[in-house]
Image (spheres, rainbow, N blue to C red):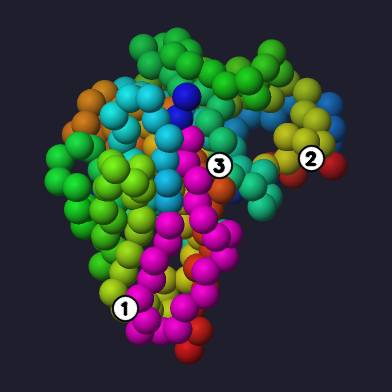
């Protein structure tokens, strides 16, 4: 069964450093998302992406964050200058189309630790 | 604005007992509702979803949920708990089944007693 994959599974970085989290969505999907889950808290929406542009973003997704689909398979989340409070599990998701017949499928997540 | 409220951050049941995880939603438009499960150190797996078809939705692993508009509820149930059901369960809502952001509840940790 096709699945969303994410790399790395765990990323440790120093405060102020840039990180890029990578995702490979399901191959024929058109909609892409990033969510995050701070330890012990709920999963929060960050951004959605369709047709090579951001469809929607949350208040969390400020100028420090950016997303890109650099090629036909990868979908990346970049944090330009990490802060301690960026430490979280980051989930990528993808879906094939809009409407009631499809579902967002989530990857296993990347745990980001900012020291 | 949409939101979900999960009653009980932690539920503990005995193996073989009924599992009932409560979720109430708030939505200004007809909602799409989901239950996701997260096993320790893993990602989110869709258990089931409600997309305005049948109000009783059957999912994987023997779980089901019933959409009750009058009560704005979407409680998750399973007749007989297994040890392998121990996990975190998230109720979630969206305005669209797939293309819009999903708003998650705070989660309920399900523990199973032998």
Residue furthest out toward the bottom = B114
The image quadrant of residue A29 is top left
Secondary structure at badge 2 equals strand
The residue that appears at 74% across and 44% down in the rendered structure is A113
Q: Decide which of A32, A42 is in the foreground and name it.
A: A42
Indicate which disc residue A43 carries: 3
| Cα distance in 3D space between marks 2 and 3 | 19 Å
Q: Are marks 2 and 1 in contact (CB under 8 Å)?
A: no
The chain letter for the residue carrying disc 1 is B
Q: Decide which of A25, B10 is in the foreground and name it.
A: B10
Chain part drawn in magenta: B3-22
| Pointer 1 residue | B80
Residue B42, horizontal then vertical, whole percent: 51, 56
The residue that appears at 48% across and 35% down in the rendered structure is B3
The chain letter for the residue carrying disc 3 is A
Residue A21, horizontal then vertical, whole percent: 59, 33
């Amino acid at each position: 069964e096709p699945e969303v994959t994410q790399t790395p599974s765990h990323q440790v970085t120093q405060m102020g450093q840039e990180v890029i989290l990578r995702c490979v969505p399901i191959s024929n999907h058109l909609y892409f998302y990033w969510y995050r889950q701070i330890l012990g808290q709920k999963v929060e929406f960050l951004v959605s992406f369709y047709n090579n542009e951001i469809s929607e973003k949350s208040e969390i997704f400020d100028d420090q964050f950016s997303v890109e689909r650099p090629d036909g398979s990868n979908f990346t989340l970049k944090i330009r200058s990490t802060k301690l409070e960026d430490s979280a599990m980051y989930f990528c998701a993808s879906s094939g189309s809009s409407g009631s017949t499809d579902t967002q499928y989530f990857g296993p997540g990347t745990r980001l630790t900012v020291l | 604005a949409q939101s979900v409220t999960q009653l009980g951050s932690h539920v503990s049941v005995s193996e073989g007992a009924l599992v009932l995880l409560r979720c109430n939603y708030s939505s200004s438009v007809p909602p799409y509702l989901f239950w996701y499960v997260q096993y320790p150190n893993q990602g989110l797996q869709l258990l089931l979803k409600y997309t305005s078809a049948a109000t009783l939705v059957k999912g994987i692993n023997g779980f089901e949920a019933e959409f009750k508009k009058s009560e704005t509820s979407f409680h998750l149930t399973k007749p007989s708990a297994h040890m392998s059901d121990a996990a975190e369960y998230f109720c979630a809502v969206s305005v669209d089944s797939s293309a819009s952001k999903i708003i998650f509840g705070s989660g309920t940790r399900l523990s199973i007693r032998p």
